[in-house]
Image: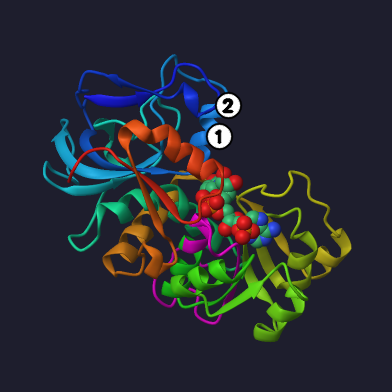
Amino acid sequence: MRAIVYSETGDSGVLRLTDRPVPEPGPGEVRVRVVRSGVNPTDWKARRGALSHPEAVPNQDGAGIVDAAGPGVTGVAPGDRVWLWEAAWGRPDGTAQEYVVLPERQVVPLPGGASLDLGASLGIPALTAHRCLTVAEGGPDRLAPGALDGRTVLVAGGAGAVGNAAIQLARWAGATVVTTVSGPEKAALARAAGAHHVVDYRTGDPAAAIRAVAPQGADIVVEVAPAPNAALDRAVTAPQGVVAVYANNGGDEVALSVRELFTRNIRYQFVLVYTVPDAAKDAAVADVRAAVEAGALRVGEEAGLPLHHFPLERTADAHDAVESGAVGKVLVDVAPE
Ligand SMILES: NC(=O)c1ccc[n+]([C@@H]2O[C@H](COP(=O)([O-])OP(=O)(O)OC[C@H]3O[C@@H](n4cnc5c(N)ncnc54)[C@H](OP(=O)(O)O)[C@@H]3O)[C@@H](O)[C@H]2O)c1
């Protein structure tokens, strides 16, 4: 089978196309014929980081068709359309290859109406967004229609991949959704994702603009840039609110005004999708699956997430596109459906 691998870390030039034997599933494992591989910032960051296996296939997310199931697999069967999550976490085998073998837990059925493009866009962004939306004081710890009724969610960077998933999941769960963006093109995408209110954080007084539409403040802030947004978050987070930080865009050190934050019992929750507790991860997978079944998670320009396709042999270009800040979702076409 065709696979993209790297055996040294560095820029995208370390990625090469090679042939590998098709792997066999063991007990509790599923072999998936990968159709689409999703690219996230974590994939190029891992490729630039420390090599943890002599040879690695990149990309955590993907979607395809179940091809074979090992002994003891009960939840999926050959022919099922599925999405995959964290394929390359702690393993040498990501989704930039024609077949991947994964534990059944990481292989999730996709309903008939959902595209494989959607499936390959879910894993990292949607599971991260779910975690950010479920760490507030008093819950909810599950997302479903009504779970966030009466709550206000502020999504920093609503045109980003995680931001887009956060907007869609928060809307599905009943929240009032406010988001920040850096300009009109991204504002249109955030609105298409379903945000009720969109604020340009680069012009005027974004805190006043957010307070104008959410006078009580945000109960949950889904934060991609905690350092540059520290003052804004302090100004707009409601008492007992939470700032859920999932990235360090714009700086790794955050200056917090402790007195102002403790006075209002504001919580900072840091989020890394890979190390979310198992029970919370299982809940996230189940809720994201339910949101997909309900048609509440979508991709494409009309859903605020333009798609950019690259063939498998151009996986390096797909990585470069993500690294240089492509707006939307970058997908690798591994094989025809
Ligand atoms: N902790 C985790 O588990 C986890 C999971 C997924 C992703 N991440 C990390 O999260 C980051 C985003 O990932 P992604 O896939 O969503 O990337 P993406 O699609 O490139 O989105 C990043 C977004 O952040 C926005 N942004 C940057 N600075 C901002 C600011 N000061 N205020 C508001 N928005 C701002 C950008 O918008 P503008 O350019 O318009 O400002 C852009 O829309 C990456 O660093 C990634 O590694 C972490």
Range of magenta residues:
140-164
Q: Is 162 on the left-hand or right-hand side of 70?
A: right
| 58 shown above or below 322 | above
Q: Amino acid at mark 1?
A: Lys
Distance from disc 2 to disc 1, alpha carbons, whole Å, reads 6 Å
Q: Amino acid at mark 2?
A: Gly
Q: Is residue 191 magenta?
A: no
| Crowd tier of the residue under label 1, counting other residues whose Cα lies within 10 Å: few below 14, some 14–19, many 20 or above | some
| Mark 1, residue position | 45
Outermost residue, top side: 54
SS class of the residue under badge 2?
Answer: loop
SS class of the residue under badge 1?
Answer: helix
* Label 1 near ligand 1 (CB < 8 Å): yes
Q: In terms of image quadrants, where is residue 61?
A: top left
- Of the pair 287 and 17, the residue shown nearer to us: 17
| 274 shown above or below 6 | below
Q: Residue at x 65, y 84 (%)?
A: 213
Q: Is 26 on the left-hand or right-hand side of 269?
A: left
Q: In terms of image quadrants, where is residue 216?
A: bottom right
| Mark 2, residue position | 49
Count of marks placed on residues: 2
Q: Residue at x 70, y 68 (%)?
A: 201
* Res. 89 mark: none
| 132 shown above or below 88 | below
| Crowd tier of the residue under label 2, counting other residues whose Cα lies within 10 Å: few below 14, some 14–19, many 20 or above | some
Colour style of the rendered protein structure: rainbow
- Of the pair 305 and 278, the residue shown nearer to us: 305
Q: Residue at x 43, y 21 (%)?
A: 6
Q: Residue at x 66, y 71 (%)?
A: 200
Could you tell me if the residues under marks 2 and 1 are in contact, i.e. CB atoms within 8 Å? Answer: yes
